[in-house]
Image (cartoon, helix red, strand yellow):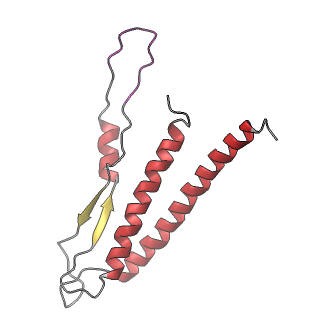
Amino acid sequence: MSFFGNTVNSLERALDYSSVKNKTISNNIANVDTDNYKAKSVVFKDALSKEMNSTFVAKRTNVKHIPFQSSSLEGSFRVVTDKGSTYNHNGNNVDIDKEMTELAENQIYYQAIVDRLNGKFNSLQTVLKGGR
C-alpha cells in the first residue's frame, strides 16, 4: 500500500503526460519553419483504452487477500510523428494555430492537476497538524 494512495500516483502520471506533451508541442512550435519537419504528438488514449479492455487479475493464495487489477499506465503514452500531411511549401506540416491551441489546453490541464495535487497535500498537512 502506498503512503499517499492511488490518487497521488495517478496525478503524478498525469503530470508526466502533460510535461511530455508540453515538450512535444514546444518542439513543434520551434520547428514551424524547418524544412521537411513533421509534427509530433503525444498519444495516450490508445494506451488507456487498451488498458481498460484488458484486465490483469493477480493470483490469490488466500480468500482473505484483496483482489486487484492492473493500473500500470505509467509510461504508456508515446510520441508519434504525423508523416501523412504537408501544410507548407517546404514539406513542413506544423499548423501553428493548432499547436498554440493545444499548448493553451495543456497548460490548463497541467494547472488543474497541480491544483488537485496541492489539495491532496494540504489535506495531509491538515491531518498532521491535528485539524488546525
Q: Is residue 83 left or right of residue 57?
A: left
Taking 54 as reference, is 117 above or below it? Answer: below
What predominant SS class does the magenta segment belong to? loop
Place residue 89 in its image quadrant.
Answer: bottom left
Q: Which residue occupies the foreground of this view, 70 or 98?
A: 70
Q: Which quadrant is home to the C terminus?
A: top right
Q: How many marks?
A: 0
Residue at position x 51%, y 32% from top?
2
Q: Position of residue 97 (x, y in %)?
A: 40, 81
Taking 44 as reference, is 93 above or below it? Answer: below
Residue stretch in magenta: 59-69
Taking 112 as reference, is 8 above or below it? Answer: above
Q: Is residue 37 left or right of residue 48?
A: left
* Residue at the front extreme of this rendering: 129
Residue at position x 31%, y 28% from top?
56
Task: Confirm whether the magenta stretch covers residue 66.
Answer: yes
Residue at position x 32%, y 40% from top?
51
Taking 8 as reference, is 85 above or below it? Answer: below
Q: Is residue 82 left or right of residue 120?
A: left
Task: Confirm whether the magenta stretch covers residue 68.
Answer: yes
Q: Which residue occupies the foreground of this view, 51 or 62?
A: 62
Q: Position of residue 25 (x, y in %)?
A: 37, 72
Q: Position of residue 58 (x, y in %)?
A: 33, 22
* Residue at the bottom extreme of this rendering: 89
Q: Position of residue 113 (x, y in %)?
A: 54, 55
Place residue 63 in its image quadrant.
Answer: top left
